[in-house]
Structure formats: structure tokens, C-alpha cells
Amino acid sequence: METVRFLNAQPSHDLTYSDVFMVPSRSDVTSRLHVDLTSTDGLATPLPLVAANMTAVSGRRMAETMARRGGLAVFPQDIPSDVVSRAIAKVKAAHPIFDTAVTISVETTLGETLGLITKRAHGVAVVVADGHVLGVVTPAACEGMDRFAQAGDVMTTDMATVTPDTAPEEVFNILASSHQQIAVATDADERLVGVMNAKGALRCGIYSPSLDHEGRLRSGVAVGINGDVSAKVRAALAADADVLVMDTAHGHQEKMISALRVAAEIRDEFHGRTGRRIQIVAGNVVTSDGVTDLVSAGADILKVGVGPGAMCTTRMQTGVGRPQFSAVLECAAAAKELGSAVWADGGVKYPRDVALALAAGAGSVMIGSWFAGTHESTGDQMNDHQGRIYKESFGMASARAVQHRTRQQSPFERARAAMFEEGISCSRMYLDPQRPGVEDLLDWITSGVRSAATYAGARTLEEFADRAVIGVQSGSGYEEGRPVEQSW
């Protein structure tokens, strides 16, 4: 059933990403930029990466940024439908090329301004009045100033302004010649459209945005299998969700199958009425049987992974799960036979893991905790006693998540549900000083995946899965491949 080739005989035991490596093959791919990273999951996003539907990860900022760079983010199931609807509306209204600016008024205090600037990676706040740009504020301008001083006291009007149709390369040249940190795009009425820094301009030449049928940024919505599934699915479709993710930790169960049938029926009705067919993702599963049952119930894509996530305690608490590489390998092969695809969900810590998941046949790779420690994740930025910057993350079956999910229930029901949580309720995800934004991580990940594809002689991800040759290694073999940051 498996499609990937093993260097030697495939072992009888299951494998994690750390257990395997890829050997180079004869290749005529001369540049990593010649590799097409379009996902093979049926969504055909320009980037095969999905920000997980975790409350500590995916919100409006993450959704916008992931879609601008060709990926996708999925709003969690615990967010009220009206809040999700407003968030998606803002994502759809955002410019597909220029970043959404952090906006403040002239009266905004510098303390509040500095807190808002950390929400975006470009490091600048734009001062506006009735949508018109008055100036910009940088952290450097706030140094030495009282935190109760106002933005109008330190803002500068010396800024580079461009139109929304200015080519990214031209934006880069304007910034280089003017020595400005950021370009502000305004429309014909001089109203703010967005911003772009030099690195953003360069990224526009590498990434393509993930757009819907109207040229707007795409995003997904997770739907739980408890409660009124029909109402939740209809609300997600009414909110303009581009992907539905039917989500529960144990996806191979009757309640999921029933919920999937409901969702598929509503999806088909929506398709008949609008002409748009929305893909349904369902999971999580780790076996071919799980894939077969969920596909037959209406799933287009299967979410694969039980227990590999950084916030997940399922394997230690229950003994249930499966090493992720083998789970992806089996489920991807089963899905391919049925004309479906899989998302590899969890367990990736390095670009190599993403490459190996795609080599195993994943159509896209879902990332959670790794993205939680970025500017664009939903959490507040904090500092530890050493001054290191972090954000809090937590599992979606943890006490913290369960408490939020059961907020409408009686105190007794909430207390009873809290007795059965799994997952870490509070973990510090430190921002990497070299890669503090999710775009920095995307650069790192895609660079590794592109290089892996060239080593395999593949120009597309479909070719990559066909051509990759996998070997099995010992723990010392894995350690041998780790870089050494200081002499031994």
C-alpha cells in the first residue's frame, strides 16, 4: 500500500520522523526555486502548510499572514460563530499583497502602542484618523519617553508612501533608496491600504497568496462534533469559510461519522446553491481503516496524528497513538487509493520533519506549537525573569481548553468534564530571536523542503513523494545530523 521507497527493507515496527532520513538521488533540478510547492491535498494552496486550529495559534493575524504566503490557517472550534464570522470578514477584506498595518490614533499612549506593535512582524504602528494616514511610530522613537505620552508626540511624517498597485520590487527599491523601514500603501483617497517592508517585498517574489474564487485570502474553520453540528456547519459556510475541519481527538468514532454525514449533506446543498464546493477535512485518525470510514462518510481530507503534538499528553496518559511517520505513510496511501488526501497533524519540530511528512505522502502539513511562538499567534507577548520573550500555548483537550469549551454548561457539568482533560494547560513557547515571525519560520521550512525536493530530483510535491528514498536510522544516526553550535 505504501508508495515511498525504503533504502533497505521496510522495518516491521512503526517509525517517527526522527527514526528516518532521506538519501539523495540523481537530480536535474538545478535550483530550489524551480520546485513547485503547491499542496497535493485537493486545495492546491501554493504552500503545503496549515496553521493548526489551536486557540493559542490561529486567529485573524495568523490567518492573514499564512494566506498571504500561500498557506492556510484554521480558526478553532471554541471561538463563537459570530466572532469567527467577523474575523473571516476582516481576512477577506485584507489586501492580498500588502500587510495589514497596526493602526493607532494620535491619542494612543506609547505603552499601548508598544504592546500593539508586537502583534505584527513589521515593527511599526501607523497613525490614522478616519482611515487617513498621519504618520508612523517605531519602537526606537518611543525610547526614553514616558509610557503615558501619546503617539502624536513621537510620530514621524517622514515615510515612504506607495499605491496598492506598486510592484513589490519597486517597493524594495524605494525603501532601499530612501532608507525607510516600511512603505505605506494608500488608495486614491489617501486612505490606508497596508504596509510592506523590504523583506516583505522580497517574499512577494517567492510566495504566491492563497486566494478564493473572488481573489480574497482563504481561511478555514474547525467544527466540533458535539452539539448542533448542522447549525455550526451552516454558520461556518455563511461566514465564508473556505475549508471545514471536522475536529476531534479520536476521529474514528461513530459520532464523527454521523457529524460528517450531516456536514457533507449541508456542503452538497451549499454547492448546489452557490456552485462552490467546500472541502471537508476530518480527523484525527492514524490507520487506513479510519481513512476508509471517514472518506465514505464524506471527508475529502483526513487529519492524521494522535499524540505527536508538543501540547498532547495522550500517549503518556492513555497509551494510545502511533508514531507519526508510519501513521502518515499508511493513511496517505489509503487516501490516495480512495481519491482523497491527508494532512500530517503534529510532531514537526524542524524543516526536515515537514519534508519527511510530504515525502510520506501528506498533501499538507499542519503545525501548531511551533507557530504558537510567533508575533502572529493569538497569545500576548510576555517576558520571563531573564527577559526572554515567549507566548503561552496549551493543548485543545487540556483543562484550560475544556474550561473554555464548556463555559455554557452548568458548574457541575463543567467540573465533571474537567476531570477528563488531556494535554498541557500552560507551556511557554519562546520566540526565536532569529525567527520571531511566522513568515520567518515559513522561510526556514520552505527552504528545507525545496532543498529536499532537489535532492530527490523532484519539481513538484507529487514527484517528491514518488521519488523520495527513505532510510531508517539509530538514535546516534539522528544525533550525528544535528549541527554543533559550539566546539566540543
Image (cartoon, helix red, strand yellow):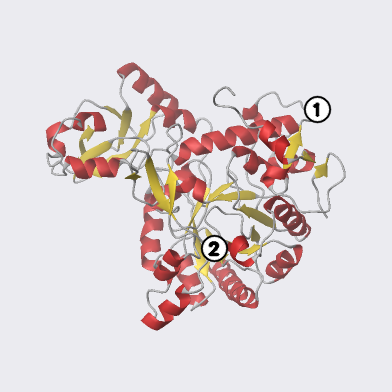
Which residue is pictured at 40% across the width and 83% down the height?
A: 412
Q: Is residue 45 above or below residue 146?
A: below
Q: Nearer the viewer, residue 408 or 279?
A: 408
Q: Quadrant of the C terminus?
A: top right
Q: Tell whether 368 sits left or right of 43.
A: left
| Residue 102 placement: quadrant | top left
Residue 62: x and y in percent read 43, 48
Which residue is pictured at 32% across the width and 30% down the height?
A: 183
Q: Tell whether 192 sits left or right of 53.
A: left
Residue type at mark 2? Leu
Question: Which residue is the extreme one toward the right?
Answer: 9
Q: Which residue is mark 1?
A: 26
| Residue 166 placement: quadrant | top left
Q: Which residue is mark 2?
A: 244
Which residue is pictured at 74% across the width and 67% down the height?
A: 292
Q: Nearer the viewer, residue 376 or 243?
A: 376
Q: Tell whether 112 sits left or right of 480.
A: left
Residue type at mark 1? Arg
